[in-house]
Image (spheres, helix red, strand yellow):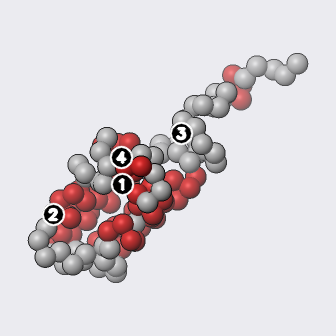
């Protein structure tokens, strides 16, 4: 995962933790770091880790889909049901964080595109 993507993912997790705590409200794509990075700048959220997980754009098949379909929603988690959904969104987004063994990348390309990525130093060939 690129460092910028990780930063946006962590920002989105913080957003939903703030919603769950009652400190901020959801403003959809306006205050979502992942949306600011991918919704407005890539076709159909193509590089977003949420889309990579679900295969769908616009956060479909995530807890956010349930959240956004509630009538009269003002963006706050002010009922037990909304708090539950906000908590599910935190859990879902947290599940997208890279595992400790995965490397972060500063540049483009898929994980493992770099020769030697993921190999331990002892497994590398000696230099000539």
Q: Which residue is mark 1?
A: 93
Q: Which residue is mark 3?
A: 102
Q: Residues within 10 Å of mark 2 (few under 14, many from 20)?
A: few
Q: Residue at x 29, y 45 (%)?
A: 56
Question: Measured from the top left, where is residue 8 in percent x and y?
Answer: 48, 60
Mark 2 to mark 4 CA distance (whole Å) = 19 Å
* Residue 45 seen: yes
Q: Earlier in the sequence, mark 3 or mark 4?
A: 4
Q: Which residue is mark 4?
A: 51
Q: Are marks 1 and 4 in contact (CB under 8 Å)?
A: no
Q: Which residue is mark 2?
A: 69
Mark 3 to mark 2 CA distance (whole Å) = 35 Å
Mark 3 to mark 4 CA distance (whole Å) = 19 Å
Question: Measured from the top left, where is residue 45 in percent x and y?
Answer: 39, 51
Give the foreground label among 1 and 4.
4
Q: Are marks 3 and 2 in contact (CB under 8 Å)?
A: no
Front residue of 101/19: it is 19
Residue 68 falls in which quadrant of the image? bottom left
As helix, strand or loop, the secondary structure at mark 2 comes to loop
Question: Measured from the top left, where is residue 44 in percent x and y?
Answer: 37, 49
Q: Earlier in the sequence, mark 1 or mark 4?
A: 4
Q: Is residue 41 above or below residue 104?
A: below
Front residue of 2/124: it is 2
Give the foreground label among 3 and 4.
4
Q: Is residue 106 left or right of residue 43?
A: right
Q: Are marks 3 and 1 in contact (CB under 8 Å)?
A: no
Q: Residues within 10 Å of mark 4 (few under 14, many from 20)?
A: some
As helix, strand or loop, the secondary structure at mark 3 comes to loop
Q: Are marks 2 and 4 in contact (CB under 8 Å)?
A: no
The residue positioned farthest toward the right in the image shown: 128
Front residue of 4/16: it is 4
């Amino acid at each position: 995962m690129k460092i910028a993507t990780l930063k946006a993912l962590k920002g989105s997790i913080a957003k939903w933790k703030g919603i769950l705590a009652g400190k901020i409200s959801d403003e959809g794509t306006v205050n979502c770091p992942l949306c600011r990075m991918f919704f407005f700048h890539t076709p159909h959220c193509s590089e977003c880790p949420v889309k990579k997980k679900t295969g769908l754009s616009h956060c479909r098949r995530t807890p956010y889909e349930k959240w956004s379909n509630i009538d009269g929603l003002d963006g706050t988690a002010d009922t037990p049901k909304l708090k539950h959904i906000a908590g599910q969104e935190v859990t879902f987004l947290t599940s997208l964080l890279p595992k400790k063994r995965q490397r972060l990348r500063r540049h483009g390309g898929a994980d493992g595109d770099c020769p030697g990525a993921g190999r331990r130093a002892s497994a590398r060939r000696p230099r000539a």
